[in-house]
């Protein structure tokens, strides 16, 4: 199969998976982990290039193109546990949530996850309505989706902006 045909097939699978995740989250069901779905669709050869200093730049460029084609600017809904929440120092957004830093898995190992959801003024949650440990369902547009190499290893950075809260479940007892 031609490389371009494979990419188009992967894009179709990803779009369908992202749509299914969004529908499930919007209906209170347990959706698949959207970031794991995205990562599973990535060409493994591009991820492997990030592990080698001689090919890191090439791999990063390939992944950047891939994510721009399949994920950027798509609106999705997803569920997560809140790791941090509060006013955002950036004037473009009034509030932000850091999603749970659950590691992602690929055949080469584990990738650290760093996810932020940014809320503009009108869509910002009321003060103290979203607490650490709460379960939230959000809907937003994928602003950033990238895999980078850090001193600690591979890391997937993922942001939604603008974002809206669809539902909040209180933090379980014992959470901050």
Image (spheres, rainbow, N blue to C red):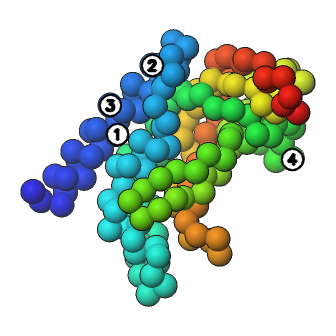
- Mark 3–mark 4 distance (CA, rounded to whole Å): 35 Å
Q: Which residue is mark 3?
A: 16
- Mark 2–mark 3 distance (CA, rounded to whole Å): 11 Å
Q: Nearer the viewer, residue 118 or 132?
A: 132
Mark 2 Cα shell of 10 Å, populated few (<14), some (14-19), many (≥20): some
Q: Residue at x 52, y 59 (%)?
A: 110
Q: Residue at x 21, y 45 (%)?
A: 9
Q: Which mark is residue 23?
A: 2
Earlier-in-chain disc, 4 versus 1? 1
Q: Is residue 15 left or right of residue 36?
A: left
User: Is the residue under label 3 in contact with that under label 2 (CB below 8 Å)?
Assistant: no
- Mark 3–mark 1 distance (CA, rounded to whole Å): 5 Å
Residue 92 found in image quarter:
top right
Q: Secondary structure at mark 3?
A: helix
- Mark 4–mark 1 distance (CA, rounded to whole Å): 33 Å
Q: Which mark is residue 89?
A: 4
Q: Is residue 6 left or right of residue 147?
A: left
Earlier-in-chain disc, 3 versus 4? 3
Q: Which quadrant of the figure contains the C terminus?
A: top right
User: Is the residue under label 4 in contact with that under label 3 (CB below 8 Å)?
Assistant: no
Q: Residue 158: horizontal and vertical position, in percent?
A: 59, 48
Q: Nearer the viewer, mark 4 or mark 2?
A: 2
Q: Residue 102: horizontal and vertical position, in percent?
A: 62, 46
* Residue furthest out toward the bottom: 54
Q: Which mark is residue 14?
A: 1
Q: Residue at x 32, y 68 (%)?
A: 45
């Amino acid at each position: 199969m031609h490389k371009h045909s494979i990419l188009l097939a992967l894009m179709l699978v990803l779009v369908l998976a992202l749509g299914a995740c969004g529908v499930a989250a919007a209906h209170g069901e347990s959706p698949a982990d959207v970031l794991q779905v995205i990562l599973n669709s990535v060409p493994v050869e591009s991820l492997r290039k990030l592990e080698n200093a001689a090919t890191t730049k090439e791999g990063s460029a390939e992944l950047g193109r891939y994510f721009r084609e399949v994920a950027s600017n798509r609106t999705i809904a997803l569920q997560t546990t809140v790791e941090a929440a509060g006013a955002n120092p950036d004037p473009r957004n009034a509030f932000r949530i850091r999603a749970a830093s659950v590691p992602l898995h690929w055949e080469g190992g584990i990738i650290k996850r760093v996810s932020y959801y940014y809320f503009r003024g009108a869509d910002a949650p009321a003060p103290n309505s979203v607490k650490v440990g709460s379960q939230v369902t959000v809907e937003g547009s994928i602003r950033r989706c990238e895999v980078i190499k850090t001193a600690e290893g591979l890391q997937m950075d993922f942001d939604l902006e603008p974002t809206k809260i669809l539902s909040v479940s209180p933090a379980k007892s014992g959470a901050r």
